[in-house]
Amino acid sequence: MSEAARLAVERAARESYGRLLAFLAARSRDIAAAEDALADAFHAALETWPRDGVPDKPEAWLLTAARRRLIDAARRAHVRHAASDELQHALELAQHDADEPEMFPDERLKLLFVCAHPAIDAAARTPLMLQTVLGLDAARIASAFLVKPATMGQRLSRAKTKIRDAGIAFAVPRTDELPERLDAVLEAIYAAYGSGWDDIAGADPRRKGLANEALELGALLARLLPAEPEACGLLALMLYCESRREARRDAAGGYVPLDEQDTTAWSQPMIEEADRMLVRAQRARRIGRFQLEAAIQSAHAARRHADQVDWEAIALLYEGLARIAPTIGALVGRAAAVAEARDAATGLTLLQSIPSNAVAGYQPYWALAAHLFARLGRTDDAHAARERAIGLCEDPAMRAFLLRRQN
Amino acid sequence: MNFSILIHENAEVFVKRSDPAQRAVLFAPIGAYLQALRDAGVFVGGAGLEPPQTATVLNPSGNGWQVQDGPFADTKEQLGGLVIIDVPDRERALEWARRFPALPGRRLELRANLIPPHQV
């Protein structure tokens, strides 16, 4: 019995944490207070459910308990600061809503927009989403972002204070603001995926885990904003990348470049889901950075049928990407694609047109430069560039791969 | 702002370093790393250190020193070398520290250097 009750609490925490918190925070406008209240409610559930049985509507039970604590806290604050009756009222309404399960709306989209609000420090946005929407603890997030837990804790609590004190609205932005605000949400989710993806060696399971969490956030966003093509585009992009995770390493853990990967090791269901997302995105006929990046990955994924890659198409997609989002990654990718589609010399010219101060610490630039110099028979230049690429490696498997080529 | 990347290594790593055959494999990626630091203009200085058993230790004795053979302390890991870099902030410093070739038995410590009084 007690075991079943404990599992019920865990299930509620896993499945409903983000929804419950979003609902409470959207009404109290105080994320930290909502978190505290929800944590108390979960504690109360752990105490009472084993004794009295699991309630029929666990979510409503948790919401009622959390709301009661929020009201108590607001009353205490009221005494101290003569806080608004409006808040009281909002909380009473929240209680009423919670009594009717179908009246318990999903406010996570609003919460995502709050987390990625322009007033919030960019470095705090992704961690804030992971903590509030997915319920990850600060220590876990800190390890994924390679900062001390105390630093991450401060960053998160500063952001929550800002949200409360600046009165940032829990609302989906107006149509005219939506594209820009949505970009910030997409960026924050992609940053979580990137922090998991960088650790391709899989040396740290906690970091690998964040890729899954980013996918979860991406899927949630695509579901909540089905009419926004970039939301689907981002999900497609992450799914294409994720589909190749197993193929990126050989049996000995060695790095396998994309064009040498065994396509049968790619995850077919993930590619199919990514294809569906990309098709859905493109129906809106509004091109964007993530759709273009997803389309590039889709062209690579096509190798599993055609056994060759349409580099002309990829070069064209990178051209578009370089126009709307000229990141260093896009520019290097374009040079690589052009080198394949036309010739190494043209690719190298494009590569070398990237400002040198932008590439001093960018490893893929030097790896590509080494590759293109080698194809042009410029052995010394290739050696020097590869040496630089080796020196900039973070991933031991990639470093070992380049060191083998160097000798 | 200067930071020191302190490289601590255990006995096995020091053994590898003394073996000419393994030495080249061990040092090749470090050489590339140091070159990348120089090319990026962040390298300030640094040194690889001879193994701890070659150390001479000076302990306080009266008003002076008592000189003894090392190592300094009987710990699992010993200082194997250090690199000093000049970067705008700790985030950048960490970015460079992460690129130092990882190896079982090797641990890194990143510390900000004190700012000399005349620069404060």
Image (cartoon, rainbow, N blue to C red):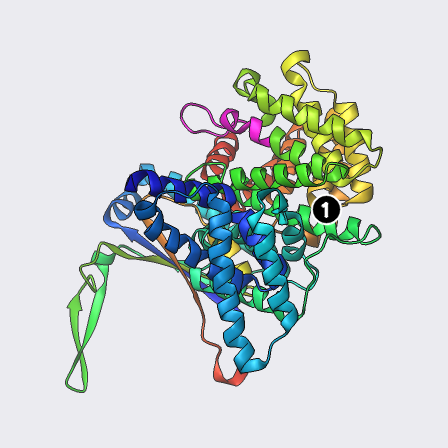
Which residue occupies the foreground of this view, A83 or A354?
A83
Hey, what amino acid is under mark 1?
Thr
Residue A380 found in image quarter: top right
Which residue occupies the foreground of this view, A8 or A363?
A8
Q: Residue furthest top?
A: A306
Q: Which residues are magenta?
A: A241-256
Q: Residues within 10 Å of mark 1 (few under 14, many from 20)?
A: few
Label 1: element kind: loop
Q: Residue sitting at 42 percent across and 23 percent down? A: A251
> In the image, residue B12 lies at what x, y percent?
25, 45
Residue A115 found in image quarter: bottom right
Q: Residue furthest bottom?
A: B63
Which residue occupies the foreground of this view, A363 or B45?
A363
Question: Magenta includes A96?
Answer: no
Which residue occupies the foreground of this view, A104 or B35?
A104
> In the image, residue A373 lies at what x, y percent?
66, 33
Q: Residue sitting at 68 percent across and 15 percent down? A: A308
Q: Chain of mark 1?
A: A
Residue B78 found in image quarter: bottom left
Question: Magenta includes A245?
Answer: yes
Q: Residue sitting at 70 percent across and 32 percent down? A: A294
Tell me, yes or no, if residue A334 can be seen here.
no
Tell me, yes or no, if residue A335 can be seen here.
yes
Q: How many marks?
A: 1
Q: Relative to residue A332, is residue A220 drawn left or right?
A: left
Above/below status of A61 relative to A166? above
Return the residue at label 1: A327
> In the image, residue A325 lies at what x, y percent?
77, 45
